[in-house]
Image (cartoon, rainbow, N blue to C red):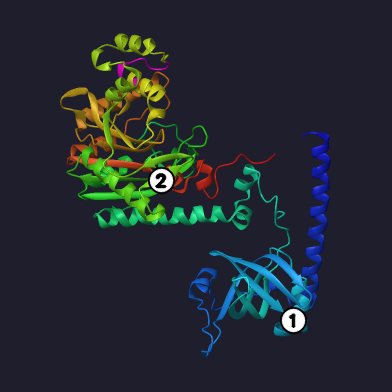
């Protein structure tokens, strides 16, 4: 920080401290008068700004008219004084509405107290609705009450709360001063409700499974580790609910889903946060083709409900979510973009040579399946702008998925890509306990070789499969990313109320 910025910061801090002293003095004065706002416990019979505006009817000239009486509470956001009358903006959850406070209407004592109110104070008012000469629906105040004192000033009107790091850390202020942020989270709630409503209508049962796991499973990811004192064992925050949900299919439920938080001890960027929201569902007697049909129907339905159309714009790119969506195998997608055909390779060495020929250097586990997946991620993923199902993944990167009968080197799996990002992952679920045990052993070998994201062996899950699990289709969707798409949000932090932040020193 430059010397000039340090000096400016010090001046701002001094100014802030002075303003806070003034506000505390006002509070003390109120308390000494027996008017402590923090003693008030409720404000009854509230209307809201949205309903007031929608219900207001202009009086018809010559007809008898009874002004609409209202009661509303909210935060004082602006004051424009005119001697014995003041126009203000009051903000509640639904927006802002203008209020008109006049000395003759509220009385001299109340008006004098009102003049001392600060921006940010929370008020309760009663009054009648009217329309100004400028055509703005407003409230003529009859009574006004201070419900809570704001002891810290809001950010200055024109500069606002611009620093993104500060906005994420102080989301409560961000919500007050940036109305579009509040709109995003209202949309988030609508999307989550819409997902639940859609799945419930399709006969899925919402369930809850453990967040604390003794074995991290269901995904390739690094877990958070904690310790249970009573049992004296290490436990893991779940990286996926998959293995528990499939136990429920074994138990006889035909259709189940869970919406909730997952935790992965990995990197952070515009697409990743250590804790995030997904939903996973499983449907007996279905396969990954059925999951594709459900996915495109669900997301296109949400787009129509939230955005009004299946044609949307995300960060300057037009995206058409109208079904049907493109479906292509991973190997064919690589061939379409690069010209390289991995169907011509049969050995690890041949696959490695083909990858190098198109400029992809392979690190980690140079086996054919991993090589194909890495080439896809390096060359193809970012090109998938319109919704595309990438199908038939290598068995090495899909330890919980059924093999394709036509080529056991591949599995019946898809991922959905939109705008170059992955949004969904789905399988025809592996239900062969012998094959599952072998896949777990392969994963353990990778783990012992240094891949700390490889699956551990879950013996109880294998035992569950031995009782018999019907053919099953499974799907997982990243809810936060979906919300980013449907709200045109740049970063995952923009759709999380309280994203993970490093504490300030």
Dot 2 surroundings within 10 Å: few (below 14), some, or many (20 or more)?
Answer: many
Dot 1 surroundings within 10 Å: few (below 14), some, or many (20 or more)?
Answer: some
Examine the residues drawn in magenta and state their main secondary structure: loop
Quick check: is 200 in the magenta stretch?
A: no
Q: What stretch is highlighted in magenta?
A: 363-370
Q: Residue at x 70, y 55 (%)?
A: 157
Q: Circle 2 is placed at which residue position?
A: 312
Q: Can residue 398 be seen in this view?
A: yes
Q: In the rendered view, would you say 136 is above or below 493?
A: below
Q: Circle 1 is placed at which residue position?
A: 103
- Residue 305, x across and y down, in percent: 37, 55
Q: Residue 68: name its quadrant.
A: bottom right
Q: In this view, does 446 lie to the left or right of 176?
A: left
Q: In the rendered view, would you say 228 is above or below 308?
A: above
Of mark 2 and mark 1, the one earlier in the sequence is 1
Q: Which residue is drawn at 65% across and 79% down?
A: 141
- Residue 281, x across and y down, in percent: 29, 46
Question: Label 2, label 1: how many angstroms apart (C-alpha)?
Answer: 50 Å
Q: How many marks?
A: 2
């Amino acid at each position: 920080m430059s010397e000039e910025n340090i000096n400016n910061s010090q001046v701002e801090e001094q100014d802030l401290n002075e303003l806070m002293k003034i506000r505390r003095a006002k509070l003390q004065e109120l308390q000494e008068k027996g008017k402590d706002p923090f003693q008030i416990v409720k404000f009854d019979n509230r209307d809201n700004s949205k309903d007031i505006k929608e219900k207001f009817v202009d009086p018809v000239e010559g007809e008898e008219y009874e002004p609409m009486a209202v009661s509303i509470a909210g935060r004082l956001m602006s004051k424009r004084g005119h001697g014995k009358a003041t126009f203000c903006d009051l903000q509640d959850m639904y927006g802002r509405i203008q209020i008109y406070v006049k000395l003759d209407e509220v009385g001299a004592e109340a008006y004098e107290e009102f003049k001392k109110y600060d921006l940010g104070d929370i008020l309760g008012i009663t009054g009648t609705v009217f329309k100004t000469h400028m055509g703005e629906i407003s409230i003529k105040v009859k009574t006004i009450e201070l419900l809570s004192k704001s002891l810290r000033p809001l950010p200055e009107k024109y500069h606002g709360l611009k620093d993104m790091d500060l906005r994420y850390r102080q989301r409560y202020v961000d919500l007050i001063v940036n109305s579009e942020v509040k709109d995003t989270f209202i949309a988030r709630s609508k999307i989550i409700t819409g997902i639940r409503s859609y799945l419930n209508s399709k006969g899925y049962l919402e369930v809850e499974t453990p967040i604390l796991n003794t074995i991290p499973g269901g995904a390739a990811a690094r877990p958070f580790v904690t310790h249970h004192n009573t049992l004296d064992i290490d436990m893991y925050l779940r990286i996926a609910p998959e293995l528990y949900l499939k136990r429920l299919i074994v138990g006889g439920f035909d259709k189940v889903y869970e919406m909730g938080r997952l935790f992965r001890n990995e990197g952070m960027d515009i697409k990743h946060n250590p804790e995030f929201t997904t939903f996973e569902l499983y449907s007996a007697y279905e396969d990954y083709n059925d999951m594709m049909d459900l996915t495109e129907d669900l997301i296109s339905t949400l787009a129509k409900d939230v955005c009004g159309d299946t044609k949307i714009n995300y960060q300057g790119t037009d995206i058409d979510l109208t079904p049907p969506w493109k479906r292509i195998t991973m190997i064919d997608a690589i061939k379409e973009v690069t010209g390289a055909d991995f169907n011509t390779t049969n050995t690890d060495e041949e696959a490695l040579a083909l990858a190098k020929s198109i400029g992809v250097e392979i690190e980690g586990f140079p086996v054919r399946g991993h090589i194909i997946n890495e080439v896809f991620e390096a060359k193809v993923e970012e090109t998938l702008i319109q919704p595309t199902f990438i199908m038939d993944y290598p068995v090495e990167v899909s330890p919980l998925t059924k093999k394709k009968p036509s080529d056991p080197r591949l599995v019946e799996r898809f991922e959905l890509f939109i705008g170059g990002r992955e949004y969904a992952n789905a399988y025809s679920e592996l239900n062969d306990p012998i094959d599952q045990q072998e896949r777990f052993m392969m994963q353990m070998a990778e783990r012992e070789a240094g891949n700390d994201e490889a699956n551990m062996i879950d013996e109880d899950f294998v035992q569950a499969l031995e009782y018999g699990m019907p053919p099953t289709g499974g799907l997982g969707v990243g809810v936060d990313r979906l919300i980013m798409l449907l709200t045109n949000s740049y970063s995952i932090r923009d759709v999380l109320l309280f994203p993970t932040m490093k504490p300030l020193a």
